[in-house]
Image (tube, rainbow, N blue to C red):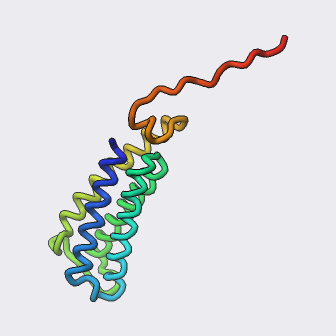
Amino acid sequence: MLCLAGGALLAASAAIHLHLWSTGYRHIPTIGPLSLLQAIVGIGLALALVVARRGRAALAGAVFAASTIGGLLVSVEVGPFGLKDGISAPDAALSLVVESMALVVLAAAAVVGARRPGLVGWQRQAGVAVPPPPMRAVPG
């Protein structure tokens, strides 16, 4: 469930960035292409999370969410590439909330995935117990 929720949150973040790109950010050099790239990668990771439901995919999603948060905070504080946004910029606060939630959910999914490495994604999600391999008799 954590991977599904994290995937939905990454898809929401991607939708926010795609909306920003389509409503004007596409005309801003460097920032426009980065907004579109965030949307494309976010959708790809969201799909990977929903399909694979693996700890590594969750970790990649958490790192992506953290980097997107970092990008927003840098644009608010520093203003790279000639654009200094404020937290009151269109959808900035919403983006920060969605990406923070994605980071928490996906970090939790990555931890859960790391603790149960012997299970494949669907088994982990379904709570399927996998028996240990059979014991071999040792000649004596």
Question: Would residue 131 be found to the left or right of residue 126 on screen?
Answer: right
The residue that appears at 32% across and 72% down in the rendered structure is 74
Q: Residue furthest top?
A: 140
**64 shown above or below 36:** above
Position of 124 compared to 130: left or right?
A: left
Vertical relation: 16 (above or below) 114: below
From this view, report whether residue 89 is shown above or below residue 4. Answer: below
Specify whether 114 is left or right of 85: right
Location of residue 78 (image quadrant): bottom left
124 displayed left or right of 133: left
Please provide percent x and percent y for residue 22. Answer: 24, 80
Residue drawn at the location 35% of the way across and 60% of the way down: 65
Which residue is rendered at x = 40% and y = 52% of the image?
A: 49
Q: How many labels does the image show?
A: 0
Front-most of residues 67 and 133 = 133
Percent of width and height locating residue 62: 39, 55
- Which part of the image, by quadrant, shows the C terminus? top right
Q: Nearer the viewer, residue 61 or 15?
A: 15
As drawn, 131 above or below 110: above
Q: Quadrant of residue 39?
A: bottom left
Locate residue 127, reporting x and y percent. Answer: 40, 30
What is the x, y in percent for residue 33?
36, 81
Task: Tell me the quarter of the image containing the N terminus.
Answer: top left
The residue sitting at 20% across, 81% down in the picture is 23
